[in-house]
């Protein structure tokens, strides 16, 4: 290894100290460039195209994000004012949640628009559409994501899909389970299981509150509902 290093050092010194040697080395390099000119040009062009494409894509995404945020501001205003039609469909100047979610799907605003659209569609009785938008929503905020799961359960329950709704409520309850919200979701799951005539599963759901969430505001109701579900489950056997 040391011999190879010394040899390379000697070659470098020769190139620096001997102009003829340097000129010869450069001529070889020049010959290489001439022989491979088309290949090198193609490589450089490809690199340039990638850089330009990346720059244009970044600018496009930045512009899209800003446009989506501007539209979201107005749609959210309508949502809070309970003007749900304008919130969903826009006002002729600004887009509504459904268009924002569709046209800016890769942006944070587009993602959040799915949540708002789902809630607004639930309020207007369009349950299948609400379910679709809520299923498109994703969040790192575990409370908000759990809320979205619960709202999907609401949409399913309104469509008569009781078991699927109950399972969705339990998914919400178990998503980073916590004593503030999980008992609420479990109660909804129990009610949905009862609507599906699955009293055993309902009783088990209520029992989970009784055992795991002893300080929950839902505790007393859970005890009563558990006793009722167990009685109905016994009668069904």
Image: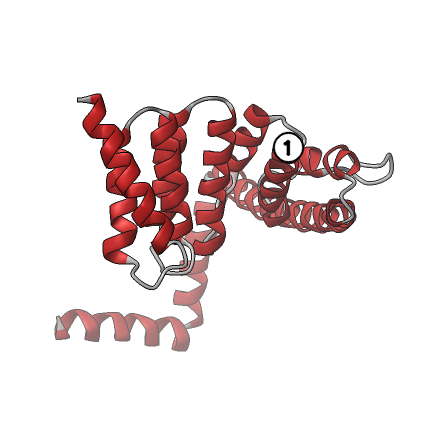
102 on left or right of 186: right
Taking the image as drawn, is residue 176 in sight?
no
Toward the viewer: 227 or 75?
Answer: 227
Residue 183 point in image, percent of width and height: 37, 52
Identify the residue at horizontal 21%, vertical 25% (top origin). Answer: 235
The picture quadrant where one finds residue 88 is: top right
> If the image is split into quadrants, where does the N terminus sit?
bottom left
Quadrant showing the C terminus? top left
Depth check, front residue: 65 or 21? 65
Q: Position of residue 36 (x, y in %)?
A: 46, 39
Quick one: SS at disc 1? helix
Residue tagged 1: 121
Q: Work out whether residue 78 or residue 220 is closer to the camera in this orientation and state it.
A: 220
**212 or 16: nearer the eye?**
212
Q: Would residue 181 be seen by someone viewing this image from the given angle?
A: yes
**Residue 160 percent across, percent down from the top left:** 46, 21
């Amino acid at each position: 290894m040391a011999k190879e290093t010394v040899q390379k050092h000697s070659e470098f010194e020769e190139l620096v100290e001997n102009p003829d040697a340097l000129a010869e080395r450069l001529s070889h390099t020049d010959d290489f460039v001439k022989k491979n000119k088309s290949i090198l040009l193609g490589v450089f062009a490809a690199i340039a195209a990638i850089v330009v494409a990346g720059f244009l894509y970044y600018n496009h995404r930045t512009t899209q994000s800003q446009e989506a945020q501007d539209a979201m501001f107005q749609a959210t205003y309508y949502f809070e004012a309970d003007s749900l039609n304008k919130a969903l469909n826009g006002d002729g100047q600004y887009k509504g949640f459904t268009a924002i979610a569709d046209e800016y799907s890769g942006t944070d605003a587009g993602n959040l628009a799915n949540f708002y659209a789902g809630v607004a569609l639930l309020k207007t009785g369009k349950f299948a559409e609400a379910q679709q938008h809520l299923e498109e929503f994703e969040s790192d905020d575990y409370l908000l994501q759990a809320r979205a799961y619960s709202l999907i359960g609401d949409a399913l329950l309104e469509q008569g899909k009781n078991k699927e709704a109950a399972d969705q409520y339990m998914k919400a309850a178990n998503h980073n389970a916590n004593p503030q919200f999980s008992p609420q979701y479990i109660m909804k799951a129990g009610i949905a299981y009862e609507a599906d005539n699955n009293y055993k599963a309902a009783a088990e759901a209520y029992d989970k509150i009784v055992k795991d969430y002893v300080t929950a505001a839902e505790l007393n109701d859970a005890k009563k509902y558990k006793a009722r579900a167990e009685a109905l489950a016994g009668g069904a056997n």
